[in-house]
Amino acid sequence: MEFTDIDVEAAFAFEPNPARIVFGAGRIGSVSDEAARLGVSNMLVVCSAGRRKSADRAATALGDKCAGVCDAAVTSMSEEAFDAAMAEIKRTGADSILSLGGGSPLGLGKAVVHETGLPHISAPTTYSGSELRGDWRVEISGGIRNGDDPDCRPATVIYDPELTIELPPLVSGPSGMNAMAHAVESLYSPAANPVSLAVAELGIAALVMDVVRLDETADLIAERNIPNSRPLTRDDVRTVLDNAFHGRRVVAT
């Protein structure tokens, strides 16, 4: 493929996302080691009811470092879900959060971190890239509480392709296209720079090759490759778009 020409005389600044990236099939099994790296010993797993099986697997991997599983996350990011997660933290004395799933549990985890300041590990199962952003929201009576705080971003992100195998093609395909859209946006951003352009183009190339393979055969090779490109595309967009997301301010997704 051909890459965008770079003006070597142009001045730019690039600030990469500081999250630790752990990638590989089966790596959710190393979550106990990642918790130990953060110095925590009582981690609450936050998920949706639909991802409870994977969350229970993570809880088993955590062993005696697991405070429990809270499957209250819902698409609406409701106040009830937030309150349920906070109640579990209080009940269990959790000292950290593992958010596992798509945008809803990842967002719930970040909202909880905003409230508590607890260390946060994320294990995404879709390709939206929420795990590398600091934006959060909670729908409350009469409005929305939201914010965008870099401190809410997970300290560690575990990309385990096996966690995405259960996704149906009608979810995997659009989610992969969404990841590609983030990378395309960075190509025409006024804040684009040589690093962001190179990373975005690599991400797009990987996505083009593998999104089409996400069919009913649950292609593990494609599932391995797409998460591998996702940290590049989302981290790139986060840096380049200066908090713009699909043309809007990032206050909630």
Image: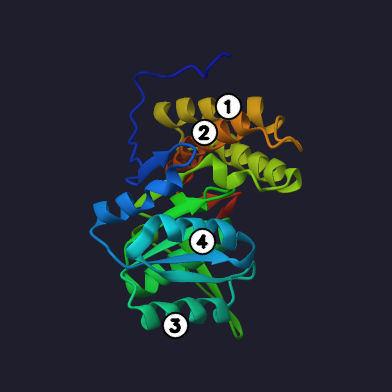
Residue 237 in the image: state x and y as whole percent. Answer: 49, 42
Q: Amino acid at mark 4?
A: Asp
Q: Which residue is mark 3?
A: 87
Q: Which residue is mark 2?
A: 229
Q: CA distance from mark 4 to mark 2?
A: 27 Å
Residue 212 in the image: state x and y as whole percent. Answer: 72, 30
Query: In the orientation shown, which residue stands out farthest toward the left?
Result: 39
Label 3 packing within 10 angstroms: few (<14), some (14-19), many (20+): few
Q: Which structural element holds mark 4?
A: helix
| Horizontal relation, residue 34 to residue 253: left or right | left
Residue 149 in the image: state x and y as whole percent. Answer: 39, 62
Q: Earlier in the sequence, mark 2 or mark 1?
A: 1
Label 2 packing within 10 angstroms: few (<14), some (14-19), many (20+): many
Q: Amino acid at mark 2?
A: Ser
Q: Looking at the image, is mark 3 or mark 4 nearer the viewer?
A: 4
Residue 239 in the image: state x and y as whole percent. Answer: 42, 43
| Horizontal relation, residue 139 to residue 211: left or right | left
Q: Are marks 4 and 2 in contact (CB under 8 Å)?
A: no
Q: CA distance from mark 3 to mark 2?
A: 36 Å
Q: Which structural element holds mark 3?
A: helix
Is residue 84 visible in the rendered image? The answer is: yes
Q: Amino acid at mark 1?
A: Ala
Q: Are marks 2 and 1 in contact (CB under 8 Å)?
A: yes
Q: Which residue is mark 4?
A: 56
Q: Earlier in the sequence, mark 4 or mark 2?
A: 4
Residue 206: which numbered mark, if any?
1
Q: Earlier in the sequence, mark 3 or mark 4?
A: 4
Q: How many marks?
A: 4
Q: Earlier in the sequence, mark 3 or mark 2?
A: 3
Q: Which structural element holds mark 1?
A: helix
